[in-house]
Image (cartoon, rainbow, N blue to C red):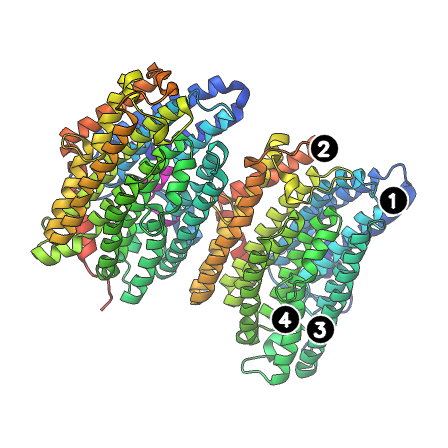
């Protein structure tokens, strides 16, 4: 193997512009926050949004790459998938920060940490998205996870937030441990950390040791995704964390964990696809069944959306179960759509909440239509989308998964997934029922009325409709991104 | 002519969005916009009939635009002899829905009209789509406005009814989607025509047939998956009931004709006994159930189920007729009857629903026991109700007669017992309808509230008179309708009796 050039030139690091820039931006935001002081806390928020916009612009200008390039001695891979996912990352985090501003202000927790941690988490996402070595994967996972643990706990006066942060941290640490252990086994048996090298060396049938390592890695991936039976943290964290943090956890990291599954399992360990696809199919079925049935009895909207996430994760995992590029494309498409819809749904919760009023119970949404028609309309569109009803985009996401499963002759998985999406439809309809068919209770405070955020939310919902009517462009893009 | 179907689909939808944007404050303008849009849709649909070529079974007025090139799913529209009458029926009925809700709907009226306009566009889309994915897209999207219509403007148990309606139909259609995707993976594109040509083994056909059966049997609805209809029908506002009975149920029948028979002919032949039995149970058993109903709308709902039993019976008689007579000639009679039964019945059940709506708007009760002697205070209304009631029970000279007659004759060709059981419905239908009329319309004035009733106002008279003319016209002169359908039905019979099993 020829040694890569160790002298760094601009062209050799150019595809990594997003990460390099982001590190600088984090330092800048940190400093600005320190000097801005208590009075001008809004400045941090504005600067962060600006930084994200500049980052996206720089990435478009310098980071665009259409071929497959390996950088930093095989640690880092640059390709179009990574490029697009990073742009999506910038966009999603920007929208998250926009949605959460009013919520944080209302509760007097508009602190710089939230913004800095969001950026470091984003850096973790970028590292994961471009990881080409077990080491990079681990760095990305930990950078993302540690930032998120801190975000959950950052409202220090909230007992329930602290509790869920600890739960998340302890369980997350165990998952990291299993990930490392699995990686060490794979490394020991193949002698390399490089995912491309591993892909060359591992073929079915594989030794028992590899399968053992694989099991540990699959467990860790399932934990990160929130697939049953490694989902226990998810409802508690979603419910316990401040809603703005739930919004963050529910969206941006999903992109990273999709990339993790793709780079690690589908590409690096692609030779063992028969082994892990069996494991994943069990996880997928359990996630679909448990997620959907437990969601039926929830009374807390955040918790309900957590179980809905679990069932959606089941669908994403089904895409991987197919084990074909078509299946990975379906999983990518589903992930992007899921993130789009989750952004909107948690956004509605954030705009409905006021200080001292969390608006996280289902009953808080009674008669929302009368109180705020726009929020109710947006939420209705998002719920129908998640239920998979056309003309909304969620329909295509499900269709794409079904198609990948049929192509690989997974008859029973199609039947189970179809049946479970009907079960799922019930609780999405229940939310719509509360908003549209019931009368408001009367004591609920007015919703957030600032125009900017509402426009973003409306655009978010419009995207769900337009991508549903004309799904072709995004479907094509996803197919192109998966090699 | 090009683009006409698209206009028919999108004109009401765009109008619906506009009504929604006008909002509750400009409801007067919204109402007129809704009326103009529905009238315009009907007027624009008339050239379809005038220019329809009755010598071919091919799709006409076709439109073809790439929609999702990757899946080879196209925005493909077209009409044949089966779908053309249904499109016109949809355009026709929606006008009455708008007029019927004119002043009756007081809360969120703009949304009410918007929902029905969007619904109209989607329903026309269902009937005119020639691409399976596009068909499914419209088919499912239709659930959303109907869910809201029942849930927002419905009766006391509306939430239960609407959830039941949505989940039942959703359950049925998800499996249809799975079947469609399966065939796409085999055929390589989503056009219905290529699904119809696709060779399929008997095992595959069976599964596909069952998936379709779930979707269409729920929609029709066939016994034993009919229980959502009485709930939804009773709780829905008058307009919603009209659309449900007049058009949405027809979609199930349409689905059998467009998908089940041509795509899975061998499985249809194998499972025809099942379908015929279920249809006969619906005709006879549900007919008895209808007799004992205390609630007028429930009675109509059960009569709809019994009627639709005729439709599915007519559709699946084709195999027995071919077997018994040995010829393809005449095999289409059951299908003719099925279609003839669906279309006028659309108008009829709509008309009966509107009659009940007229009474409900005045008395706010659907219980038969609350009425009696309505003829004394509302003579004009009583005349209409009697006419529609008789037509509903299949009186010769009204549109209800033609279809039932054709189906019974076809059933006779297949088996004596089929026709015997099917003919029982003539007695049952007469029983529940006439008994309903006797208790509601005739007799002495039942109570003070009936004594205070006002007869039809101009708006209501217009609606019922227009429907009455349509009912009588098709009854005495069904030939044009039969002529439109003829080539398509022949083609369908050929498709249904051919085998698709690869050698």
Rendered position, B412 above or below A171: above
Residue drawn at the location 31% of the way across and 55% of the way down: B195
Q: Residue B232: x and y, percent?
A: 41, 40
Q: Mark 2 lies on which chain?
A: A
Residue corresponding to mark 3: A178
4 or 1: mark nearer the eye = 4
Please state the extent of the stretch shown in magenta in the rendering: B122-133
| Disc 3 secondary structure class | helix
The residue lying toward the viewer, choosing from A37 and B400, is B400
Residues tagged 3 and 2 counted as in contact (Cβ below 8 A): no
Classify the position of the N terminus of chain B by image quarter: top left
Of the numbered discs 4 and 2, the one sitting upstream in the chain is 4
Residues at discs 4 and 1 in contact (Cβ within 8 Å): no
Query: Does residue B132 show up magenta in the picture?
Result: yes
Q: Position of residue A24 (x, y in %)?
A: 82, 52
Residue at label 4? A218
Q: In this view, does A20 lie above or below A182?
A: above
Per the image, label 1 sits on a secondary structure element best described as helix
Q: Quadrant of the C terminus of chain B?
A: bottom left
Q: Quote the CA–CA distance across marks 4 and 1.
A: 41 Å
Q: Of the two numbered discs 3 and 2 on the same chain, state the one appearing first in sequence.
A: 3
Pick whichever of labels 1 and 3 is earlier in the sequence.
1
Q: Which of B60 and B443 is in front in this view?
A: B443
**Residue B360 in magenta stretch:** no
- Give the number of the disc on residue A32: 1
């Amino acid at each position: 193997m020829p040694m890569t050039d160790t002298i760094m030139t601009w062209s050799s690091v150019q595809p990594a512009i997003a990460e390099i820039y982001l590190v600088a931006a984090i330092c800048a935001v940190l400093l600005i926050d320190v000097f801005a002081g208590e009075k001008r806390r809004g400045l941090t928020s504005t600067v962060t949004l600006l930084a994200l916009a500049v980052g996206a612009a720089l990435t478009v200008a310098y980071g665009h790459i259409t071929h497959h390039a390996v950088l930093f001695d095989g640690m880092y891979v640059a390709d179009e998938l990574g490029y697009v996912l990073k742009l999506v990352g910038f966009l999603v985090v920007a929208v998250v920060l926009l949605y959460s501003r009013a919520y944080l202000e209302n509760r007097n927790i508009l602190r710089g940490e939230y913004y800095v941690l969001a950026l470091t988490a984003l850096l973790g996402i970028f590292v994961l998205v471009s990881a080409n070595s077990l080491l990079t994967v681990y760095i990305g996972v930990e950078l993302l996870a540690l930032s998120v643990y801190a975000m959950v706990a950052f409202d220090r006066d909230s007992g329930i937030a602290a509790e869920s942060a600890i739960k998340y941290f302890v369980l997350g640490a165990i998952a990291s441990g299993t990930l490392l252990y699995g990686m060490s086994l794979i490394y020991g048996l193949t002698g390399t950390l490089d995912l491309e090298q591993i892909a060359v060396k591992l073929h079915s049938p594989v030794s028992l040791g590899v399968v053992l390592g694989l099991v540990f890695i699959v467990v860790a991936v399932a934990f990160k995704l929130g697939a049953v039976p490694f989902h226990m943290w998810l409802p508690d964290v979603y419910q316990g964390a401040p809603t703005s943090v739930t919004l963050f956890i529910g969206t941006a990291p999903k992109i990273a964990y999709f990339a993790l599954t793709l780079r690690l399992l589908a590409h690096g360990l692609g030779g063992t696809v028969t082994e892990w696809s069996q494991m994943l199919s069990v996880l997928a079925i359990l996630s679909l069944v448990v997620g959907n049935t437990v969601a039926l009895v929830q009374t807390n909207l955040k918790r309900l959306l957590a179980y809905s996430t679990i069932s959606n994760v089941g669908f994403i995992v089904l895409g991987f179960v197919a084990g074909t590029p078509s299946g990975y494309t379906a999983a990518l498409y589903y992930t992007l759509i899921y993130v789009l819809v989750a952004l909107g749904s948690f956004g509605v919760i954030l705009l409905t909440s006021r200080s001292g009023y969390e608006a996280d119970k289902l009953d808080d949404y009674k008669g929302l239509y009368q109180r705020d028609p726009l929020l109710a309309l947006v939420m209705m569109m998002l719920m129908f989308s998640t239920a998979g009803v056309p003309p909304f985009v969620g329909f295509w996401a499900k269709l794409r998964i079904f198609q990948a499963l049929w192509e690989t002759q997974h008859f029973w998985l199609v039947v189970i997934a179809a049946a479970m999406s009907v079960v799922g439809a019930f609780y999405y309809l229940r939310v719509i029922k509360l908003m549209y068919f019931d009368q408001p209770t009367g004591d609920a405070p007015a919703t957030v009325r600032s125009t900017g955020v509402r426009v973003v939310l409306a655009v978010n919902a419009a995207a769900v409709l337009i991508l549903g009517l004309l799904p072709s462009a995004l479907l094509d893009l996803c197919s192109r991104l998966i090699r | 002519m090009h683009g006409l179907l698209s206009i028919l689909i999108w004109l009401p939808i765009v109008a619906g969005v506009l009504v929604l944007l006008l909002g509750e404050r400009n409801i007067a303008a919204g109402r007129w916009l809704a009326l103009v849009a529905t009238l315009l849709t009907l007027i624009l649909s008339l050239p379809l009939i005038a220019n329809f070529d009755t010598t071919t079974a091919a799709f006409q007025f076709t439109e073809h635009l790439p929609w999702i090139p990757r899946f080879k799913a196209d925005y493909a529209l077209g009409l044949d002899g089966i779908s053309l009458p249904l499109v016109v029926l949809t355009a026709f009925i929606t006008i009455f829905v708008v007029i019927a809700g004119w002043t009756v709907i007081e809360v969120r009226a703009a949304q009410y009209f918007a929902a029905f306009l969007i619904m109209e566009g989607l329903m026309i889309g269902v009937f005119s789509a020639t691409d399976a994915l596009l068909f499914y897209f419209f088919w499912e999207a239709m659930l959303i406005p109907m869910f809201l219509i029942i849930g927002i403007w419905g009766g006391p148990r509306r939430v239960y009814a609407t959830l039941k309606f949505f989940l039942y139909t959703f359950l049925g259609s998800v499996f249809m989607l799975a079947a469609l995707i399966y065939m796409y993976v085999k055929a390589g594109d989503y056009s219905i025509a290529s699904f119809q040509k696709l060779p399929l083994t008997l095992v595959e056909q069976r599964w596909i047939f069952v998936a379709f059966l779930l979707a269409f049997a729920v929609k029709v609805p066939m016994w034993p998956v009919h229980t959502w209809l009485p709930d939804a029908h009773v709780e829905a506002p008058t307009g919603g009931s009209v659309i449900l009975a007049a058009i949405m149920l027809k979609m199930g029948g349409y689905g059998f004709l467009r998908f089940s028979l041509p795509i899975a002919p061998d499985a249809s032949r194998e499972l025809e006994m099942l379908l015929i039995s279920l249809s006969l149970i619906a005709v006879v058993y549900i007919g008895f159930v209808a007799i004992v109903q205390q609630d007028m709308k429930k009675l109509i709902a059960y009569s709809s189920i019994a009627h639709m039993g005729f439709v599915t019976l007519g559709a699946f008689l084709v195999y027995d007729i071919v077997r018994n007579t040995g010829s393809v000639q005449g095999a289409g009679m059951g299908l003719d009857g099925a279609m003839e039964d669906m279309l006028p019945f659309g108008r009829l059940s709509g008309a009966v629903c509107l009659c009940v709506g007229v009474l409900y708007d005045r008395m706010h009760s659907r219980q038969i026991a609350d009425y009696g002697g309505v003829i004394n205070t509302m003579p004009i209304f009583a005349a209409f109700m009697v006419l529609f009631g008789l037509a509903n029970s299949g009186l010769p000279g009204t549109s209800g007669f033609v279809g039932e007659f054709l189906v019974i004759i076809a059933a006779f060709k297949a088996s004596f017992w089929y026709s015997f059981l099917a003919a029982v419905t003539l007695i049952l239908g007469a029983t529940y309808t006439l008994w309903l009329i006797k208790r509601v319309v005739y007799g002495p004035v039942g109570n003070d509230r009936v004594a205070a009733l006002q007869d039809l106002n101009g708006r209501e008279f217009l609606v019922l008179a227009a429907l009455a003319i349509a009912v009588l016209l098709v009854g005495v002169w069904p030939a044009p309708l039969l002529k439109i359908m003829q080539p398509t039905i022949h083609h369908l019979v050929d498709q249904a009796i051919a085998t698709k099993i690869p050698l």
